[in-house]
Amino acid sequence: MFMFKRYYADMVTEAAVPPAQAFRFFCNVQDWADWSSVIANARLLNGDWRRGALLMFAPKLPGLPAAPLIVPILEFEPDHRITWGVNLPMARMLHRFTFTPVEGGSCRIHHEEWSEGVISLLTLPVTRRLRAFNERFARELAAMF
């Protein structure tokens, strides 16, 4: 379907809490700026987390001003997975968090972001910044547990 694919995040961190607890913490989107140094502001614009809701967040990418982005929630599975992003016929950019149980009551948080199609070419100038942003966000999230 898409010929060109680029990954900006594909990492797993551990949280010493059950997936449901880590998921609920993550879903407190209005608190992201309190625990993440790479988020200036974040909130849901039209209700609660659900497919079709709109997420507004202002990432702080190194060397760039924090500009708000508005993206739809494409996938929402309570206590397990959230995916948001842009999904167009010739291009897509998706960001996904998956919370998976691990023996002993803790969980793994799989953090992914990738683009496909023409968006992959448009993001070439900021690829390193996107990767640094994602790594920092994932590590700061895991550090909250």
Image (tube, helix red, strand yellow):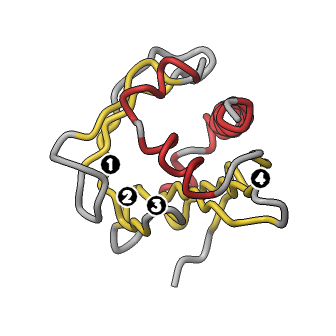
Q: Nearer the viewer, residue 11 or 119?
A: 11
**Comparing labels 2 and 4, the label whose residue is closer to the camera:** 4
The one of 127 and 13 positioned closer to us in this rendering: 13
Q: Report the disc number at residue 71.
A: 1
Numbered mark located on residue 11 in the image = 4
Mark 3 or 4, nearer chain start: 4
Mark carried by residue 86: 2
Q: Residue at x 48, y 57 (%)?
A: 93
Q: Amino acid at mark 1?
A: Val
Q: Residue at x 49, y 55 (%)?
A: 119
* Quadrant of the rendering where the C terminus is positioned: top right
The answer for how far apart the CA atoms under marks 3 and 1 are is 10 Å
Cα separation, mark 2 vs mark 4, equals: 21 Å
Mark 3 nearby-residue class (10 Å; few <14, some 14–19, many ≥20): some
SS at mark 2 in the image: strand
Q: Tell me the SS state at disc 3.
A: strand
